[in-house]
Amino acid sequence: MTATVWRHAPPVAALLFVALLLPPSRRLLESSMTLQMLVQLPLLIGVGYLLREAVPAPLAAVIARWNQHGISGLVLASLAGMFWMLPRSLDAAVSLPWMAFAKFASAPLLIGLPLGLSWPHMGFVVRGVFLLELIATFFRLGWLYLVSPLRLCNNYLLDDQQRAGEAMLVIGGVILAGILAKLLWGRFNST
């Protein structure tokens, strides 16, 4: 992104975060497993990613020393992301106010922001491993949600779980196709 666009990223992130907190949008996005997992959580992660421009330069320098090649931030983001992919976590975020608070705090700060700070420092191999694991996770969980005869989330019906599984398989396929196209016809190393 250009410098002008990134300069406006923190206010955009704040507006998006407030919009996601509003009760009508929360009700809508938490009414379906598919919407919560594949729309609300990625938007919250996007808020954190955009916040990387709000990190003061001295703090960014300290983080960069700790986050060599973006690996530490990637590990943190991956661990937090795995937690929010668990059906029990999704259920609790709808049922328990303290878990909803945890979701709205941890998705931007423990997934999005570390990814935003790490991505520019990651090399080709680290980005590749991250993206391949992301694709594999979409395929694994999508298949699990699609074929499981039992409801994995108490707040959502089995057909919603299966729709989420189908959507995850499609998203995994689209990301894989995008990576293959970029490897064959584009520059993969661009930020």
Image: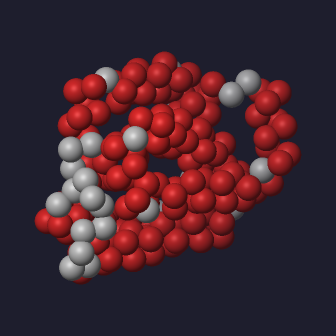
The spot of residue 139 in percent (x, y) is 37, 75
x 31%, y 48%: residue = 36
* Left or right of residue 123, residue 104 in this image: left
Q: Does residue 131 sit above or below 15 in this rendering?
A: below
Judging depth in this view, the residue of 101 and 12 nearest the camera is 101
* Left or right of residue 6, residue 184 in this image: left
Judging depth in this view, the residue of 63 and 5 nearest the camera is 63
The spot of residue 23 in percent (x, y) is 27, 25
Q: Does residue 111 sit above or below 52 in this rendering?
A: below
The spot of residue 156 in percent (x, y) is 22, 56
x 67%, y 59%: residue = 75
- The quarter holding residue 22 reads top left
Judging depth in this view, the residue of 62 and 79 nearest the camera is 79
x 17%, y 61%: residue = 157
Count of numbered badges drawn on the protein: 0
The spot of residue 14 in percent (x, y) is 47, 22
* Colour setting: secondary structure
Q: Is residue 27 visible?
A: yes
Q: Is residue 112 visible?
A: no
* Left or right of residue 74, residue 57 in this image: right
- The quarter holding residue 117 reads top right
- The quarter holding residue 173 reads bottom left
x 57%, y 31%: residue = 51
Residue at the left extreme, as displayed:
159
